[in-house]
Amino acid sequence: MAINEPLFQHIYLKEKETYNLLKVDRPYFIVPWHLHPEIEIMSITGGQGTRFVGDSVENFNEGDLVIVGSNLPHCWKSGPSHYAEDAKCHAKAHVILFGENCFGEQFFKLSELKGIKGILEKAKRGVCVTGKTRKIVSEKIALAYQENGVDRFISFINILNILANTTDYRLLVSTGYSTNLIDSDMLRLNKVFDYLTLNFAKQVRLEDVASQACMSPTAFCRYFKSHTNKSVIHFLNELRVGHANKLLIESNENIGNIHYKCGFRNASNFYEQFRKIASCSPLEFRKKHQAKELFLT
């Protein structure tokens, strides 16, 4: 890839437009852990990996739809399959970026738009859209690329209105989460996230993780906890359990063998950590997903 290649391909983006409708299509997501004042609606249309929003760490796949509030740190890290020499996976997404005052300070304060104001407030904790709403909104975002002017504006407001009036969502970031990240923190944590995302299935030494941040293990543990609201081992276990979720959903792999592929050295620790993070056993998780798939079909 050329060094000067843009991070995003801008679609229908003009200087005086009040919000940005963008497309991502590349071998893997490259935007690092970052934040910005604009609110972001991210619709994944291809690829898989790990999504980081505030102190939330979860898998993402095609169809994932998330609203990220203003100045909430976030990034999408593509999975290992995107980096293989013969990789066929592509990271694809539709993105809407807009400021809360993009139509003037009073616009979203109008009584008719009270619901939209509410969902923008919830977005400060990250909103993962689920159920039928996720499919409906993702399709409407895709259609908006074919529109211009007033039609595209109406589509945008319609999308926000659907999001404002649905119960198909859950909040991602824990109550009380806050951050005072500066650019050096972003760069340091991004290196750590990259390392853990690509190596969680192996034996991970604290010394090796700390070296990514150029810190001693003791100092790094304090630093990581203060900036992510969780310990290094808990964060690593979330990545591993997230991968286990993927294997449980996408394969018929024997549950007794899955822990090896996720980085857990023994089955008892795998079951213990899985239940702590997923609030159910691996078997219960697989059955729940299978029942959900039957319901949707």
Image: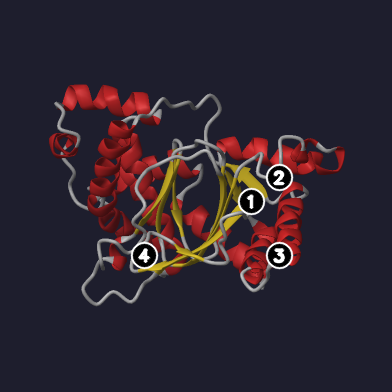
Q: Do tag 2 and tag 1 residues touch (Cβ < 8 Å)?
A: yes
* Mark 4 closeness class: few <14, some 14–19, many ≥20 residues within 10 Å: few
Dot 1 or dot 3: first in sequence order is 1
* Residue 107 percent location from the top left of the image: 77, 40
Task: Tell me the distance, in whole angstroms, between the alpha carbons under discs 2 and 1.
Answer: 7 Å
Task: Tell me the distance, in whole angstroms, between the alpha carbons under discs 1 and 4.
Answer: 51 Å
Judging by the rendered image, the residue that carries numbered circle 4 is 254
Judging by the rendered image, the residue that carries numbered circle 2 is 103
Task: Tell me the distance, in whole angstroms, between the alpha carbons under discs 2 and 4.
Answer: 53 Å
Drawn side of residue 103 relative to residue 114, left or right: left
* Mark 1 closeness class: few <14, some 14–19, many ≥20 residues within 10 Å: some
Drawn side of residue 160 relative to residue 212, left or right: right
Vertical arrangement, residue 241 with respect to residue 187, above or below? below
Judging by the rendered image, the residue that carries numbered circle 1 is 18
Dot 2 or dot 1: first in sequence order is 1
Amino acid bearing label 1:
Thr
